[in-house]
Amino acid sequence: MHQFLSFVQKEFYHILRDKRTLLILLGMPIVQIILFGFAISTEVRNARLAVFDPSNDVVTQRIINQFDANRYFSLSMRLDNPENIDDVFRKNKADLVMVFEEKFNENLLHTGKASIQLIVDGTDPNVATILIGYANNIIASYQQELMTGKNIPLQIIPQVRLLYNPQMKSAYNFVPGVLGLILMLICAMMTSISIVREKERGTMEVLLVSPMKPLLIILAKAVPYFALSAVNLITILLLSVFVLGVPIAGSIFWLAVISLVFILVALSLGLLISSLVETQVAAMLASGMVLMMPVMILSGMIFPIENMPLPLQWISSIIPARWYIAAVKKIMIEGLSISYAMKELIILLVMAFVLITISLKKFKHRL
């Protein structure tokens, strides 16, 4: 029994000496419970509401106030011209646009019917369905309140219009997310593992003392994964178009440019991980913690970023996949020009420059 306890004590000493393993064992559950507890939510709260109200009567104002008072919506802007509705969605200034018909109150009193058009971005079918459901419930509740004590039946008819994805295909939402996840994992994880594998085998030292410069050695390790990622990009896009029926509505050239910049960001991130760890297992764990879980939860791939607490929204800003997925949706799904995705492209370029600079400074030229 004494020998058994001695071995148990020895294992505790090994674990306590290895600070990185201890951090993973004790830190990962805390990070996971925070992310899963606060980031994962099927509710859509504080959705930005834009209103075009040519009638501007008592009833329309009450309906707008009902929406604004509800926790699911927040009135963000009033439109003067219905031609600006598409531009509102292109610039991501609203999640739902509500359009009242002219003489709304007058039509409701004389004919017993009036219509409200609900316009929503259909690139994320789940969010669009939830927002339409919330809006219909608020309108139905106000209609019931309006009919209280009246013998005349009144009917407010919501007319739903879905932009960019009228068929409500889920592929329109998950294709950009899967594209970002696959490119990130292949580039970053495989690059970090391949370089660390050289360290473990002792062959990295042989490579570093060769006539070739260390920078060229690292580039030589990264180029194959860059090429494989480009092949994966082409494959996913072909499958999306011809198998899943998701068309490329915008410029293929700019979609390729943004994708290649994102691949460069992922490669530099993999290089940074390889310079911080010494074993393949550590590289895989670091890649899984730093890349896979945040990409799936904090990039907007599955759960809307707007629903998350502010600290998690700030953290999501440093996730490269968030900006890449947003840019792909704008160009590939919505068919917008590169000017609408210029913000995302600039952020990815800055990330690539910063990560490459840090990675090269952290990389050990001598073992």
Image (cartoon, helix red, strand yellow):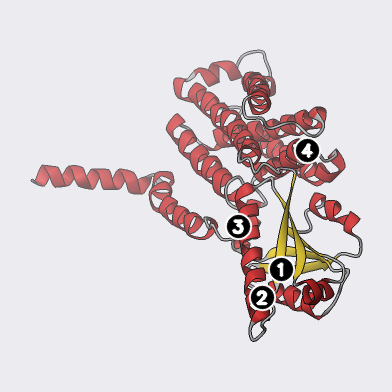
Res. 331 mark: 4
56 vs 147, left or right, is right
Pointer 3: what residue?
A: 130
Cα gap from disc 3 to disc 1, whole angstroms: 20 Å
Cα gap from disc 3 to disc 2, whole angstroms: 19 Å
Q: What type is the residue that disc 2 sits on?
A: Tyr
Point out residue 61 in the picture as x, y percentages from the top left corner: 79, 77
Cα gap from disc 1 to disc 2, whole angstroms: 9 Å
Q: Earlier in the sequence, mark 3 or mark 1?
A: 3
Q: Earlier in the sequence, mark 3 or mark 4?
A: 3
Pointer 1: what residue?
A: 156
At x 43%, y 50%, the residue is 28
Determine whether 90 is above or below 216 in the image. below
52 vs 241, left or right, is right
Determine whether 306 is above or below 232 in the image. below
Q: Closer to us: mark 1 or mark 2? A: 1
Point out residue 11 in the picture as x, y percentages from the top left corner: 26, 43
Q: Earlier in the sequence, mark 3 or mark 2?
A: 3
Assign a secondary structure to mark 3.
helix
Cα gap from disc 3 to disc 4, whole angstroms: 24 Å
Assign a secondary structure to mark 4.
helix
Q: What type is the residue that disc 3 sits on?
A: Ile
Would you say residue 71 is visible in this rendering? no
Check disc 1: other Cα within 10 Å, few if <14, some if 14-19, many if 20+: some
Q: Earlier in the sequence, mark 1 or mark 4?
A: 1
Point out residue 104 in the picture as x, y percentages from the top left corner: 82, 71
Cα gap from disc 1 to disc 4, whole angstroms: 36 Å
The front one of 172 and 227 is 172
Check disc 4: other Cα within 10 Å, few if <14, some if 14-19, many if 20+: many
Res. 127 mark: none
Q: Closer to us: mark 3 or mark 2? A: 2
